[in-house]
Amino acid sequence: MKDISIRIVEPLDETLHQLIQLLDEELLERYPSEEVHGLDFTDPGITDTVFIVAFSGDEPVGCGAIRPLDAQYTELKRFFVHKGSRKRGIAAAMLSFLENEAQLRGFAGIRLETGPEQPESLKFYEKHGYVFIGKFGEYVDYELSMCYEKRFGA
């Protein structure tokens, strides 16, 4: 893990968008397109979202983001580790980084949406203290959405 670095990047960062493209391709292999929930990069509020890219040496291997939902919660979005770099602790390092950022910004917890076709994600989030909750926000009407949250200090 010592060769892993994580950097906050701007919303229009080219490397970030290359990783998001890989994430979308993988999600579209598992879900119908209407069940894939991205981010609107043309939304002026996109600048409130914190984006990260993880590197192994100089190679980009993962990405993620947190975007504010309300005064208490931020949402984990676009969380992805390249297939060839999984099982090396990169996702855990990225999650820890984003949780720390959320706490520094005064949030009480993080919420997220995933789905049943990503059993590895469900296990990962549960292992890291996330608990299953009812669907929230834009996910309420989506059959395959599964939502989780982690409250800090709880």
Image (tube, rainbow, N blue to C red):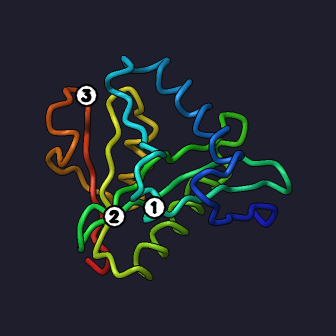
Q: x, y percentage for residue 35?
A: 32, 26
Q: Nearer the viewer, residue 151 or 10?
A: 10
Give how far apart the Cα atoms at labels 3 and 1 are.
25 Å
Q: Name the residue under label 1.
A: 49
Dots 1 and 2: beta carbons under 8 Å? yes
Q: What residue type is labelled 3?
A: Leu
Q: What residue type is labelled 2?
A: Pro
Q: How crowded is mark 3: few (under 14 residues within 10 Å), some or many (20 or more)?
A: some
Give how far apart the Cα atoms at labels 1 and 2 are.
7 Å
Give how far apart the Cα atoms at labels 2 and 3 are.
23 Å
Q: x, y percentage for residue 47?
A: 48, 62
Q: x, y percentage for residue 91?
A: 57, 53
Q: Which amino acid does label 1 sit on?
A: Thr
Above or below, 79 against 94 in this view is above
First in sequence: mark 3 vs mark 1: 1
Question: In front of the other: label 2 or label 3?
Answer: 2
**In the displayed structure image, the side of residue 127 where residue 153 appears, left or right:** left
Query: Secondary structure beneath disc 1?
Result: loop
**In the displayed structure image, the side of residue 121 where residue 153 appears, left or right:** left
Task: Say which mark, if any, is on residue 144.
Answer: 3
| Quarter location, residue 20 | top right
Task: Say which mark, if any, is on residue 68.
Answer: 2
Residue at image position (35%, 81%) is 106
